[in-house]
Amino acid sequence: MAKKTSLKDIAQEVGVSTALVSYVLNNKKENKISKQVAQKIRAVAKALNYRPNQIAKSLKTNKTFTLGLVVADISNPFSSSLTRIIEDEADQQQYTVLVGSSDEQPQKARKLIETLLNRQVDGLLIVPTEGMEKQLADLQKQGVPFVLIDRYFPDLKTNYVALDNYGAIYKATQHLIDSGYRRIGMITFQTTLYTITERKRGYLEALKANNITFSKSWLKEVRRATYKTDIEKAVRELLGGKNPVEAILFASNTLALFGLKPIKELQKRVPDDVAIITLDQADAYDLFHTPVTYIRQPLPEMGQLATRILLESIPKNNAITQTNLDGELVIRASTRST
Amino acid sequence: MAKKTSLKDIAQEVGVSTALVSYVLNNKKENKISKQVAQKIRAVAKALNYRPNQIAKSLKTNKTFTLGLVVADISNPFSSSLTRIIEDEADQQQYTVLVGSSDEQPQKARKLIETLLNRQVDGLLIVPTEGMEKQLADLQKQGVPFVLIDRYFPDLKTNYVALDNYGAIYKATQHLIDSGYRRIGMITFQTTLYTITERKRGYLEALKANNITFSKSWLKEVRRATYKTDIEKAVRELLGGKNPVEAILFASNTLALFGLKPIKELQKRVPDDVAIITLDQADAYDLFHTPVTYIRQPLPEMGQLATRILLESIPKNNAITQTNLDGELVIRASTRST
DNA sequence: CTGAAAGCGCTTACAG
DNA sequence: CTGAAAGCGCTTACAG
């Protein structure tokens, strides 16, 4: 790269100190600097195509105006939508975002966070994975500002912004029940992640509250590592046998995306043969023969709120903010109207 | 944040100079440092939970090990998949990636690149937008290493990695013709972007080579700003009237995603009423009643190659590498088998 | 084998 | 109104 111009170059050119140049270019002590010098400095800066070295600035000020973002996998729509929202929100406050994917592996997350911290990010936005409790507790001990998104650990007193998962799935289940379905299957992930276990609890509690006797065969917990094949198998089991379910509740985006395919292949009519409801929306569902009823997850609110909480906690970092947002039921043709 | 430990802290604790500590921790002059001191330094570094300040290091070495990535919109699957690939490739070489979205606006791209450059990224990976020629030429004049991905400007002598767009669409069109279709419609974006105009050319040339007289009404160029409604309108026009087309070629991912919906709503049988072929694959298409034939875009190769070219050009930055990759035809049920 | 010292490009009290 | 100087946390020739 061609030699970059520095404050010093400008100072020399104008014949003043670098201090003055710094003051002018940062609009400090505005009323105490002669207009003429200021103008000249600006002119020269422009002429020399001056570009402040943010690295040097950061070293001195101990602020990088960079946020670290850890998602599960940036190539997944949930992560990338969230990233986009956070990017926009951060940008408004002059922050830039360093993103990385953890692939649901705590070790990868650890390495990633280490890298981000070495780069002196001012704070972290984290969609945690299973088994990160210790790591997060350590971060907290070290005084690193961070806020969790989407997932959190109930035993950890950390900032977080997440869905009211219990409530959202309860609402979804209740909607199915209100629509006349009683044999309701659920496909979810096999994990100890609170976010997911709360979804299961919402489903089970809703059944119980409506005096529906839960059958173990209704609940399918697929493994992350093999979810594509597991989901297909789960769907076929739920819809096969002598007592197929009348409705299927997908606990997430990804689950629905891969679960709708076997339903289509089995040539099931929706909602006549089986009703469908899912958590979280995707454009893709519009290609399915029947528009799918879903619980809208307030992603923009989640991302924005998390970013704001983080930015506020950077200077002080004392309060803990924990927020559970409501999911919104969007009824479409895949569940019988009542 | 709690006070971080620095090289100096370790040096003091051990009773040596910071220089020595730096050498040890960076594994330099290994054979010239007494094993014992080295061991002690490492031990203390660990005990004090030392984390090198990458910012300070960068200031000194003039290398940040950070790459800037400019995509159109990170929330779009093409961008996020590409980001993921680049992230992984960069990570292998100890690089971190700063991403941002241009929203197809050259001014936004300019601001983004400015920010990335201020942060002293070592190089840039750019999916450019219409109207960025001047900007890119300037970057080049400044000696900033960068490589373009997916889109490029034929008049600009820059590094790039892209699809052979002409060839890919020619292949797609030829496949339709070989399958017996002659009235072939194309839905593409209205833009001067070479990537896209080459696709149009591939379509037109294939028709010509097969002695099919092109009808202007077959080609629909939708506006980016209003693509969702434009696509729907385009599909309805192509399939309506007295002389509907027999096949539709979608020039991109997004176009197909929103174009399949009206085809479904019009209850067209595929491929009997209309054959479908598209550029680029998406999981979402699996939800469509008929599996869609597509041209596979070699995203992993593209992202990896671009990253490698960039990393190689950072130290020297003299050679120009321009690569057009081949698209691969994946035939499924949406086009008649021959 | 080890250390003193300069310097990367900034900011910012302090002095005048 | 302006400048000299210290210092952020590192690296790296150079000297011994």
Image (cartoon, coloured by chain):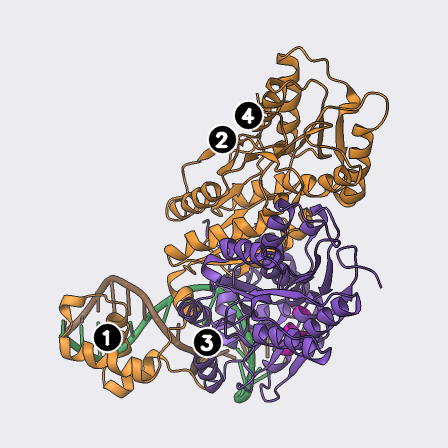
Chain colours: A orange, B purple, C brown, D green
Verify whether residue B61 appears in magenta. Answer: no
Residue at label 1? A20
Amino acid at pointer 1: Leu
Q: Is residue A232 above or below residue A92?
A: above
Magenta-drawn segment: B303-309
Give the x, y percent position of residue A194.
Answer: 62, 32
- Decide if residue B279 is on the left or right side of residue A299: right
Q: CA distance from mark 2 to mark 4?
A: 7 Å
- Say which of B126 and B213 sits in front: B213
Whether labels 4 and 1 share one chain: yes
Q: Is residue C11 above or below residue B288?
A: below
Amino acid at pointer 3: Met
Letter of the chain that mark 3 sits on in the rendering = B
The answer to whether the residue labelled 2 contacts the one labelled 4, judged by CB atoms less than 8 Å apart, is yes
Amino acid at pointer 2: Asp
Instruction: Find residue A167 and name its label.
Output: 4
In percent of the image, x 77 and y 44: which residue is there? A228
Letter of the chain that mark 1 sits on in the rendering = A
